[in-house]
Amino acid sequence: LMSGRLAIYPDEDARIPIAHVEPGECIGEISIIDDEAVSASVQALEPSHLLVTNAAHLWELMAEEPAVALNLMHILADRMRRNSVAMLESYRQQAQLNSIATMDAVTGLHNRRWLNDMFLRQIDRCARAGLPSSLAIADIDHFKSVNELYGHQAGDRVLAQVARVMLKALRPSDLVARYGGEEFALLLPETSLEAAVAALERLRLAIGQSQASIAQRTTVRVSVSIGIVQWREGWSLEALIQAAERALYAAQQAGRELMFPAGTVR
C-alpha cells in the first residue's frame, strides 16, 4: 500500500474489520505463496494507491534478490504473531463469557447451568469407581421476610453470606451452586449418606451461628433447612435432585431449621 488505508474483513458480509492496512504494509502475500483463493475481503477506507505485482514476478524477484524473500518472511512472521495475539485475546474473551454465563452474580457461586454439567460429571466419575456421592438442597428459612422487611439488596447480602459460609465449611472437592432463589445445591462426591449428614449438619450449624450484615449497624441471623439424598444406580441427576427436594420439603414441613436425609422421607 503506497498511500491511503485499507480494512480487512473475514468475508464480504462482515461489518467489523479484523485488521487495517497502513502505508508500507502489504496484502495478498499468503495467496501468492500457497496459490489459493483469497481468504478475506479488503476494502479501501479512503482513496488509496497500491503497487500491484503478480505471483510469477514476485517469485522471480525473490530468486534474484534474497533480501526480497527475507523481507517477505519478516512480513509473514509479523502477520502470524498478530494473528496469534488476536486468537489468544479471542480465547480469553470467550473464556470470560463462559465464566459469566455459568456464574451467579449475587453469590459468586456457579449457577444451575454449570450444575447440570459438573454435578453429572462427578456423579458419573464416582459411579465408575464404585464410590458413593450425595446431593443436598439447602433452602434459607423465611427468606421472603428478609426481602419484605429490609429490601432485596439486604436479601442479596444474606445470600452472599450463606454462600461464603458454605464455601468455607465444605471441602474443596465438594461442589456448590445456587440452584435458584434462596436454594443452593451441594454435591459431596465420594461421600455416603451418613457422612454427608454429619458434614451438612456442621454446615447448618455454622450458617445459623453466622451473621449477615444487611445495613450499617444492622445484622441478621438466618437458618437453613436441608434435604439430603445419596445417589442410587440408575438415577438421573433430575431424579437425584427431586429426591433431595422431597427431603427438603419434609424438613420445612416439620418446622424448618432442620435437616432430613431422603431415607427418612416416605
Image (tube, rainbow, N blue to C red):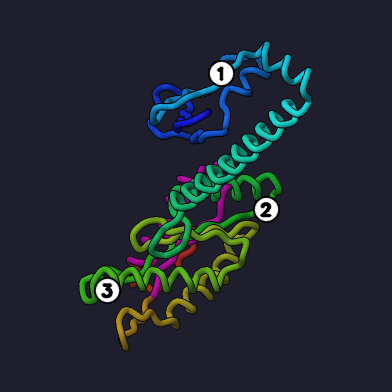
Name the quadrant containing residue 62. top right
Residue located 62% across and 23% down the image: 29
The mark tally for this picture is 3
Classify residue 220 by image quadrant: bottom left
190, above or below 256, in the image: above
Q: Is residue 233 magenta?
A: yes
The residue stretch that appears in magenta: 223-252
Inspect this view and state whether residue 177 appears.
yes
On the image, the x and y values in percent for residue 32 come to 64, 17
**Residue furthest top in the image:** 56
Give the answer, above or below, for where 129 lies relative to 68: below
Apparent side of residue 75 relative to residue 255 in the rendered image (left or right) = right
In whole angstroms, how far apart are the C-alphas of marks 3 and 1? 72 Å
> Mark 3 vs mark 2: which is more N-terminal?
2
Q: Amino acid at mark 1?
A: Val
Q: Nearer the viewer, residue 20 or 218?
A: 20
Q: Amino acid at mark 2?
A: Leu
The label number, if any, that marks residue 87 in the structure image: none
**For this rendering, which residue is in front, 109 or 194?**
109
Say which amino acid is labelled 3: Val
Question: Residue visible at 59% across and 37% down?
Answer: 83
Which residue matches tag 1? 52
Residue position for label 2: 131
**Image position, residue 9 (x, y; %):** 46, 28
Closer mark to the observer between disc 3 and disc 1: 1
Task: Please tell me which residue is depicted at 43% across the width and 61% down the height of the picture.
Answer: 184
Q: Which is nearer the N-term, disc 1 or disc 2?
A: 1
